[in-house]
Image: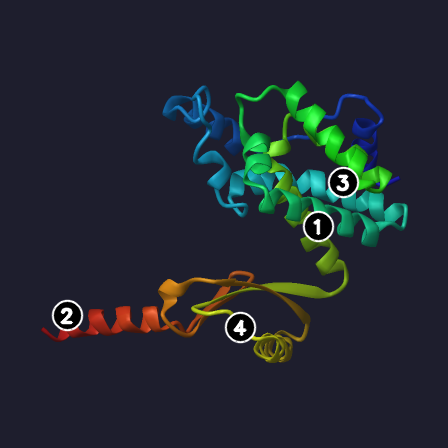
Amino acid sequence: MLEGARILQQGVDDQPLYIDESPQFAEFLGYARETGFIGANRFEGFSRLSASSSVFANIARPYASALFDLANETKSVAEVEKNLSEMGALISSNADFSQMLSSPVISAEAKTIAIEKILAKAKFHKIVANFIRAVARNGRLFVLPTMIDAFGELCAKARGEISAEVISAAPLSKKQLGDLAKTLKTKTGKTVTLDASVDPSLIGGLVVRVGSQMIDSSLKTKLSAMKIAMKEVR
């Protein structure tokens, strides 16, 4: 069994699960306590932190990697990915559930009870159910959405795919998304999955992010550049 899977298996078999975490996380906890993020009556702001933040990503990565190793070893990657996607959709579509996962004022026992009810209804693969239980037991449910994203990225990488974030001023049609995916595939040489969202403030055009690269053809950016150019002329 691969090392990551072995570590995770220890956790899902009701044994202590300890995964080294980034020193940034300890720093973040100190900052959170000082600013009132932890200990406040309402836990606002923490759940709104970007899922791509280095703190969350550093915590999520070893969990996702261990789960991927175990799923790959048991030839259940596709089913695990599907189950996690369903869990992610539930979290993103239910504000109360999302807030519960991220709140430090809700007891671990209460969170575990809620998670068990969901797992009983969801009928997830045993690996997924045990993984979520291990995450809950370790007090890391607030990073679960990031773990789900990280697992999806590992699956996409294994399939030779890459993901691209597409932000437009108005919803794009299926044809437009298909054409964009084909164009990006030609440029990158890989199959591209699109994560599309809408931001009316762009006014027009697109913003496309692929990895660390960004193409910004939005009208908002062009107008901003024009304003800067006009100031320089003065």
Residue indicated by mark 3: 66
Q: Secondary structure at mark 1?
A: helix
- In the rendered structure, which disc, 3 or 4, sits on the residue that comes first in sequence? 3
Marks 2 and 4, Cα distance to the nearest angstrom? 34 Å
Q: Is residue 182 left or right of residue 6?
A: left
Quadrant assignment for the C terminus:
bottom left
Marks 3 and 4, Cα distance to the nearest angstrom? 36 Å
Q: Any mark on residue 85, and which?
A: 1
Q: Any mark on residue 172, and which?
A: 4
Q: Are marks 2 and 1 in contact (CB under 8 Å)?
A: no
Looking at this view, is 102 or 34 the one in front?
A: 102
Marks 2 and 1, Cα distance to the nearest angstrom? 48 Å
- In the rendered structure, which disc, 2 or 4, sits on the residue that comes first in sequence? 4
Closer to us: mark 2 or mark 4? 4
Q: Which quarter of the picture shows residue 129? A: top right
Residue indicated by mark 2: 231
Residue type, label 2: Lys
Q: Secondary structure at mark 3?
A: helix
